[in-house]
Image (cartoon, rainbow, N blue to C red):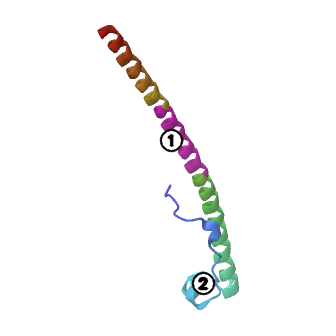
Amino acid sequence: MNRLHSDPSLLPCPDFEADAYSVSRLTLVSPTTTDAQAADLLCAVWVTTSEALRAQWTQQVADDQRLHLEHQHLAEEENVRLSETICINEEAAKNDEKKKN
């Protein structure tokens, strides 16, 4: 699944009755489907797609937060290990110094 780069809930539904969408509507117009019904159909498809993208965005944000917390936890563990290593090395150096004296 492709990563979304912006929140789809910020996008308004286009005005499918506008001239810019006349070609899209024309492909749907038939003896049983009017131009207005074609615009409604395009809107329904847009809403369905938008809902799926919003769910994907919500999941993506949750996954990003989880990964951030995992990385933060791993970094904290690494800092603890480094601190312990420094303490061990300092203690070993002190013991070596005591042995020399």
Single out the mark in the foreground, 1 or 2. Answer: 1
Magenta stretch holds residue 69: yes
Residue at horizontal 62 percent and vertical 73 percent from the top: 11
Q: CA distance from mark 1 to mark 2?
A: 48 Å
Q: Which residues are magenta?
A: 62-79
Residue at horizontal 50 percent and vertical 58 percent from the top: 3
Percent x, y of residue 67: 54, 44
68, above or below 77, in the image? below
Q: Secondary structure at mark 2?
A: helix
Left or right, residue 37 beside residue 77:
right
Left or right, residue 71 beside residue 51:
left
Magenta stretch holds residue 58: no
Residue at horizontal 59 percent and vertical 54 percent from the top: 61
Q: Which mark is residue 84?
A: none
Residue occupied by mark 1: 71
Camera-nearest residue between 93 and 6:
93
Percent x, y of residue 12: 65, 76
From this viewpoint, which residue is outermost toward the front? Answer: 101
Residue type at mark 2 is Arg
Residue at horizontal 64 percent and vertical 57 percent from the top: 55
Percent x, y of residue 20: 56, 88
